[in-house]
Amino acid sequence: MAVLEMNGIHKSFADLHVLKGITLHVEEGEVVAIIGSSGGGKSTLLRCATTLETIDEGSIRIGGIDLDYKNKKTLAQIRDKFGLVFQNFNLFPHFSVRRNITEALISVHKMSRDEANSICDSLLNKMGLADKGNAYPCNLSGGQQQRVSIARALATNPEILFFDEPTSALDPELTAGVLNVIRDLAKDKMTMVIVTHEMNFARDVADRIVFIDHGIIVEQGPASEVINNPRNERTKAFLSGMRN
Amino acid sequence: MNTELLWSTIKQLWQGFGYTFGIFGFTLLFSLPLGLLVARGRMSKNIIVSSLVRIYISIMRGTPLMLQLLLVYFGPYYLFKVSTGNINIGPFNYRFIATVIGFSLNYAAYFAEIFRGGIQSMPVGQYEAAQVLGFSRMQTYFKIILPQVVKRVLPSVTNEVITLVKDTSLAQVLAVTEMFTVAKELASSQVSVMPFIAAGVFYYIANAIVEISMNRFEKKMSYYS
């Protein structure tokens, strides 16, 4: 069953036609990596899927719920179905790590504090941050902050997790910890859509690679095919550019 | 120097200081929340609301506070023939009430611009993170945005609070017997500048207390950056 169904998505900013009819379906347990040059529309696609941008045309369905911007109830339901990890984390700096993870559980999902804390503890364990619950984001490295934001996105037990260039804001030596966490999630059959520039990582972790350029899906398929033997000229040009 | 005279001067100034502190306290109590409201209005997407608020701020900042006080005090009678002589709220007569209204309206305009700067300096990512986590607009505002804004605006707010301590002396134009009014009367009856100097010491001590408390508050907020 498809967890995410995006059909014929169009999106423009003023005169700029960014998404020109993109259709993307993601199956349960599938890991999809979206690659492409900057300005090609990959981040916009992710922002549309996560309700941060409204689409001009097309339809979006996540976890069986149709997105309808006018219906507040389904909008809230759909936001429960996914988690989003931002490029620059967007942790709440005035909250401790623990509160960053538990606040939505307590004040949005009306969970008890004990229940939320136990979810938080198990997630921090998983992220290798078991002793950081009381720390504040400013005291953590970028890699640790990103792992906290992954824990925050996972706390509500979403059906699908979106990543917007999760390692782009990190120093190279800090990316490994974050990528390993995502690898572990892939092993646990978490459904994920990852916008990334890390080609090796994409090849390792993704079941399917989607190459987006100028607002359309130019090429997609298993990682080995798209990255190792691209068929489309634009894909070839993009990948050879990445290698240099 | 006559210590007895000094002592009686200090005692009388201290009595006046009650009003000074009253103007200060009530003004903060009303102008801070009002300023937040005005800031919201200033940022409203409704052009009529934001324009009206913009004009309000412009007038409040562009004309003397002393003039505004006189207008609040005399306006009701001269403009609408409403007698204000019998208006009392608890122990406060209309002189004092008009002073607090004038100060609050004026300071709200300044606070509003400070708050607006703080709110607009918040990264959009904070709103976006809150949105995808399902926080309501109210929760986002009160749990995520406002606490961070408070920290950001603290130095500018301290500036205004210190100015307010000194501005309370403008209440003398409505003959409120706050400390400065008392000092002026004492100076002329004693034919001496000593009451002015004593009043200056009072203002300075009051502001030293403001500074120390605000510094402490800033330090308390420095657990994150």
Image: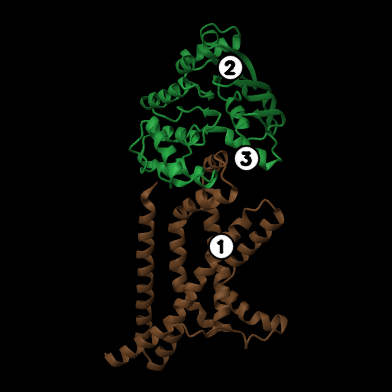
Chain colours: A green, B brown
Nearer to the camera, B223 or A40: B223
Residue A52 visible? The answer is no
Q: What distance separates the C-alpha of mark 3 from that of mark 2?
A: 30 Å
User: What residue sits right under mark 2 in the picture?
Assistant: A211
Identify which amino acid the numbered label 2 is placed on.
Phe
User: What residue sits right under mark 3 in the picture?
Assistant: A76
Q: What is the x, y in percent for residue B154?
A: 44, 57
Dot 3 and dot 1 residues touching (CB under 8 Å)? no
Which residue is depicted at the point 51% across and 17% down?
A206
Mark 2 neighbour density, 10 Å: few (under 14) some (14–19) many (20 or more): many
Identify which amino acid the numbered label 3 is placed on.
Ala
Q: What is the x, y in percent for residue B29?
A: 51, 69
Relative placement, left or right, of B167 versus A45 is left
| Pointer 2 chain | A
Point out the tag, 3 or 2, that comes first from the N-terminus.
3
Identify which amino acid the numbered label 1 is placed on.
Gly
Q: What is the x, y in percent for residue B171?
A: 51, 79
Q: What is the x, y in percent for residue A164?
A: 52, 29
Q: Are marks 1 and 2 on the same chain?
A: no
User: What residue sits right under mark 1 in the picture?
Assistant: B35
Q: Where is B70 relative to B6, above or below?
A: above
